[in-house]
């Protein structure tokens, strides 16, 4: 990530803990009060709403992530995640996955072409 882009996001209220190990495309929109830990890669059209935390080692492509959501060491592609969700660690949201508000997507869960209803939990070791 370029230092100029880092400074621009910082002025908007985004906390990036290590900009040298973080990649964020210019097409990514990030609201204030988002914390991005090291080793995150954000590609394509992404919208990250306020108060989210991206813990280390995520790869996110073309997604909408709702406010107050935490994502840990996961891969998200062409998906939508609701508000107040927890994703990961080591989850894989494949294209056309829709996660409702208040959901928990746990360890080693893979979701493809599915809608997970509000306040649902897919705890671990699952394929939906």
Image: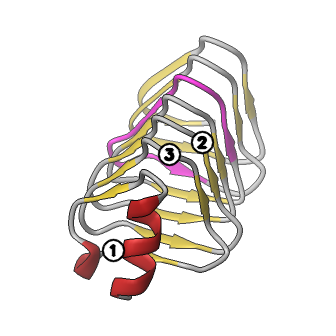
Q: Which residues are magenta?
A: 80-93
Labels 1, 3: front one: 3
Q: Is residue 25 above or below residue 39?
A: below
Q: Secondary structure at mark 3?
A: loop
Label 1, label 3: how far apart the Cα atoms are: 17 Å
Query: Which residue occupies 45% across, 65% down?
Result: 9
Q: Which mark is residue 96?
A: none
Mark 3 highlights which residue? 32
Residue 49: x %, y % from top left: 60, 42
Residue 46: x %, y % from top left: 65, 61
Label 1, label 2: how far apart the Cα atoms are: 18 Å
Residue 64 is covered by the magenta coloring = no
Q: Which mark is residue 49?
A: 2
In the picture, the quarter occupied by the N terminus is bottom left
Q: Residues within 10 Å of mark 2 (few under 14, many from 20)?
A: many
Residue 73: x %, y % from top left: 33, 53
* Residue projecting furthest to the front: 11
Residue 1 in view (yes/no): no
Label 3, label 2: how far apart the Cα atoms are: 8 Å
Q: Which mark is residue 22?
A: 1
Which of the 4 quarters of the picture holds residue 11?
A: bottom left
Camera-side residue of 102 and 95: 102
Labels 3, 2: front one: 3
């Amino acid at each position: 990530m370029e230092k100029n882009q880092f400074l621009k996001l910082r002025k908007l209220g985004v906390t990036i803990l290590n900009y040298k190990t973080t990649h964020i495309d210019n097409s990514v929109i990030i609201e204030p009060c988002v914390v991005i830990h090291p080793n995150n890669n954000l590609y394509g059209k992404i919208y990250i709403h306020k108060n989210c935390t991206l813990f280390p080692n995520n790869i996110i492509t073309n997604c909408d992530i709702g406010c107050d959501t935490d994502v840990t060491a996961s891969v998200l592609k062409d998906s939508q995640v609701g508000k107040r969700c927890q994703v990961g660690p080591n989850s894989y949201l494949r294209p056309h996955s829709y996660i409702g508000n208040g959901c928990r997507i746990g360890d080693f869960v893979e979701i493809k072409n599915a809608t997970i209803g509000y306040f649902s939990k897919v705890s671990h070791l699952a394929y939906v």
